[in-house]
Amino acid sequence: MKTFVKMSLLSYLVFGLTSAFASYTFEDLQALEGQKSYREFLQHARDIRPSERSKVWSEMLGNMATGYMVHLRAKKDFDLATYQYVQVLSDWPELRADAFFHTKREAYLLDYLKNCYERKQAGCREQASEAWHLGRKNPDNGTLLAQVLATHDPRADISNYILPSLQADISQFYCRKDFIQSWVLSQIAPRVLASEDSSKIKTEITQTIHEACFIAMKPLFIRGLSASSNDLRNISYRVLKAFDSIDQSDEDLYLTTYLLEGPSVGKTFNLAWAVVKELGQDYKRRQTLLKRLAKLDPLPDTLFDSGNILKRDTLAKFIAGHLPEYFSFYADTCVRYRNGIGEYPNGNPTIQCDKFFTLAAQNNWLSQEVTTKYSATLKP
């Protein structure tokens, strides 16, 4: 920012001296407007005394400043000196409220910043901040600036640029953008993972984003229930639960997967236990769940590798008693994979197969047929 201030002062001095040595008349400015001599016009626009700056003069200034932005962008004039001059113009009182000028200014500066990053020049992040400081603080401008930074400078803090677009009902439009969803996730993740209290989670989230933003992001959280990342699954479930936006099928999938991945004891564990118990009494609901579990790759099985033997055995026996179809499907998938039957684009879908079969043999959970097929895969 100090650099910009210095350059601004220098620019004012230079342009002031130019005007002092060659004062232009209103007729001169009209001639320059007709010739589309943008830079010369702007350098001498203030030669006209303040008391003589009429409405016509103001309209000429707005038109020429706007045209200059269009001209610079078309020429791809992305020199640092040009950027600094644009910043000086942006701070002119006569142009601060000119919406047409600022719309074209913003378009030019976005292209300037993209060029800055693509050419790996120094100071791009600071120049983005300066452009925002002197520009309009509207959601569109901020979001577009943030998108340039998110693409070219992922470590940059984009919060100042996007918060105006996230904390109002218009956020439903902006929160569909991938880079904004990534930013929101990064902001809420630590707080969501630290709590199982739905009321507290909702309060924490709505301090960052408007509820309309959640509506736009809801599909992301629903997909997150089937993610391979435990953290993303947990975040997705807790957020959906906090906003009362999860249906029974999605909740069955998450909570069953939660148990199969070796959960920690807490509110979610107690709920998962109760839901799986309900599933044991509802064949149709179990079949719906099994179809969804079958689409996961790899299949959830971290429980079988748990170092806590008591916890592993207790949970595995509980699941075997209430969701036996999953264990049968898991065993069959393992045997098919080892025999080269079927397609497995991500490799082994049953990572803990051997430990599962050892546990299953100890508890007589599987048919003799599948056990024999598994044993055959172990032979050299």
Image (cartoon, helix red, strand yellow):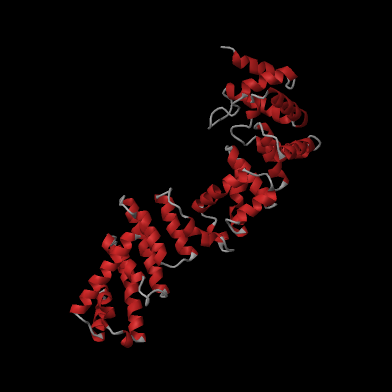
Q: Which residue occupies the extreme left position in the image?
A: 21
Q: Residue at x 29, y 63 (%)?
A: 6
Where residue 31 appears, as percent x and y from the top left, is: 24, 82
The residue depicted at 31 percent of the width and 60 percent of the height is: 3
Foreground: 1 or 179?
1
Residue 365, quarter of the rendered image: top right
Residue 245 visible in the snapshot:
no
- Residue at point 59%, 34% (across, down): 297
Q: Position of residue 7 (x, y in %)?
A: 28, 64
Q: Nearer the viewer, residue 370 or 259?
A: 259
Q: Residue 228: x percent and y percent?
A: 58, 37
Q: Is 366 rendered above or below residue 6?
A: above
- Identify the image quadrant of the C terminus: top right
Q: Quadrant of residue 87?
A: bottom left
Percent position of residue 285, x then y: 76, 40
Q: Quadrant of the N terminus?
A: bottom left
Q: Is residue 121 left or right of residue 356?
A: left
